[in-house]
């Protein structure tokens, strides 16, 4: 059994445990305040990143583990197997993962059944639920898949993530260009307006870290123009830093974990500056400690997420990140997390609110 499945089954067994997170969330509440963004109350700022719970099967256990929010998916309209195995490779010395999963998932009907079951359960642990959507490998008209997913799952989501940054679906990253992106976001927003009633979920866009300065500028201006609600920075990288073992580095796919950390932080800072701190950012990439999370927040992230850190450090990492982050904020004299957002950027601080 690989580490992914070990952690997945471990999370499932947490279903049997009580409310591990409630006491912990109270600590956040009484010290550094809740993060309220897009009108959503995040019990703490540490979330489970997309890809782990592709079919919305372990949202409850993930909250019980201490995550303040869980992003389920990437879900596609039709079920698909993904790429042939092996498709996940670990490098424990560098705390790195390369994956070329290719969105294996049970499709939107299965996702909806699982999410409905969780939403209908009587003793739901507190936490925000994001739904990360993507297109099937066979789709040549992306807007069709994103629209049908929003129609079916949008009304159930606290927020929606439009994922155009997985390196493992051919053509997906081509959407990270001004014209196709504006077209897609217009379709996404129109479907949200049609299907999501009086409480439309905020729309976030998840981008790759492999963007040069000109591409970052183009995308920042496009997302401001499209008036979406936020960004998730970043997905995995196609880069292969020199210190990776050769055999591991040769694997095809997206690299995550420690080696993507600095690159992702730099992209967060850049987008925070390019959008003048006006577009909330969820920072992800190489986080496995409170210090890593703090770096991302100081660069401009309002919230953080992790995936690979959970694989290498185990389930206790969620609480240790939250505890250490609280200690770091206190050490630096902050009384609310929002006061630290973007302080390592060139954006001039306007107020202590991140709402
Ligand atoms: C095995 C694996 C599968 C992933 N699948 C998805 C996915 O389906 N959708 C997505 O948006 N990101 C996916 N990601 C990317 C993560 O959500 C995250 O953006 C990236 O791994 C960087 O964070 P990390 O260093 O904490 O892992 C996946 C990552 C891994 C390691």
Image (cartoon, rainbow, N blue to C red):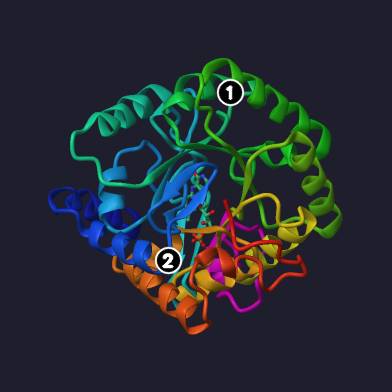
Tell which residue pokes out farthest to the right in this image. 214
Q: How many marks?
A: 2
**Residue at left offset 54%, top offset 19%:** 148
Q: Give the labeled residue for mark 1.
A: 192
CB under 8 Å between discs 1 and 2: no
Above-or-below relation of 330 to 214? below
> Residue at left 40%, top 50%?
69
Circle 2 sits in a helix, a strand or a loop, which is it? helix
Q: Give the range drawn in magenta.
A: 236-260
- Estimate the x, y position of residue 346 in percent, counting from the top left: 77, 69
Q: Tell me if residue 117 is in the magenta stretch.
A: no
Task: List the residue tagged with mark 2.
Answer: 309
Counting from the top left corner in percent of width and height, residue 11 is at 25, 53
Which numbered disc flags the more N-terminal residue, 1 or 2? Answer: 1
Work out how far the residue at label 1 is from the one at label 2, CA to CA, in angstroms: 33 Å
Q: Residues within 10 Å of mark 1 (few under 14, many from 20)?
A: many
Q: Residue 45 carries which label?
A: none
Left or right? Give the position of 347 relative to 48.
right
Pointer 2 local density, CA inside 10 Å: few below 14, some 14–19, many at least 20? many
Q: Is residue 244 magenta?
A: yes
Q: Could you tell whether 324 is left or right of 218 in the image?
A: left
The yes-or-no answer for disc 2 within 8 Å of ligand 1 is yes
């Amino acid at each position: 059994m690989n580490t992914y499945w070990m952690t997945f089954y471990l999370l499932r067994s947490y279903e049997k445990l009580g409310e591990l997170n409630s006491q912990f969330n109270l600590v956040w509440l009484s010290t550094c305040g809740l993060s309220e963004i897009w009108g959503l109350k995040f019990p703490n700022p540490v979330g489970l990143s997309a890809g782990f719970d592709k079919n919305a099967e372990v949202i409850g256990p993930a909250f019980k583990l201490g995550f303040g929010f869980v992003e389920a998916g990437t879900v596609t309209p039709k079920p698909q197997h993904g790429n042939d195995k092996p498709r996940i490779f670990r490098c424990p010395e560098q705390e790195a993962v390369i994956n070329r999963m290719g969105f294996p998932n049970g499709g939107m009907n299965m996702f909806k059944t699982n999410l409905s079951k969780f939403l209908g359960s009587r003793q739901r642990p507190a936490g925000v639920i994001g739904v990360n959507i993507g297109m099937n490998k066979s789709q040549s008209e992306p807007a069709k898949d994103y629209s049908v997913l929003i129609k079916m799952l949008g009304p159930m989501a606290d927020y929606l993530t439009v994922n155009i940054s997985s390196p493992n679906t051919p053509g997906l990253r081509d959407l990270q260009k001004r014209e196709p992106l504006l077209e897609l976001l217009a379709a996404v927003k129109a479907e949200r307006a049609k299907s999501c009633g009086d409480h439309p979920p905020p729309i976030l866009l998840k981008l790759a870290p492999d963007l040069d300065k000109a591409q970052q500028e183009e995308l920042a201006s496009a997302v401001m123009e499209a008036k979406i609600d936020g960004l998730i920075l970043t997905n995995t990288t196609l880069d292969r830093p020199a210190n990776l073992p050769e055999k591991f580095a040769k694997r095809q796919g997206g690299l995550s974990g420690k080696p993507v950390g600095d690159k992702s932080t730099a992209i967060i800072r850049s987008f925070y500056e390019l959008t003048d701190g006006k577009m909330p950012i969820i920072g992800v990439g190489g986080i496995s400690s409170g210090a890593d999370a703090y770096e991302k927040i100081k660069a401009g992230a309002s919230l953080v997420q992790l995936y690979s850190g959970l694989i290498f450090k185990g389930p206790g990492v969620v609480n240790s990140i939250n505890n250490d982050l609280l200690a770091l904020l206190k050490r630096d004299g902050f009384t609310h997390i929002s006061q630290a957002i973007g302080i390592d950027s060139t954006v001039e601080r306007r107020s202590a609110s991140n709402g």
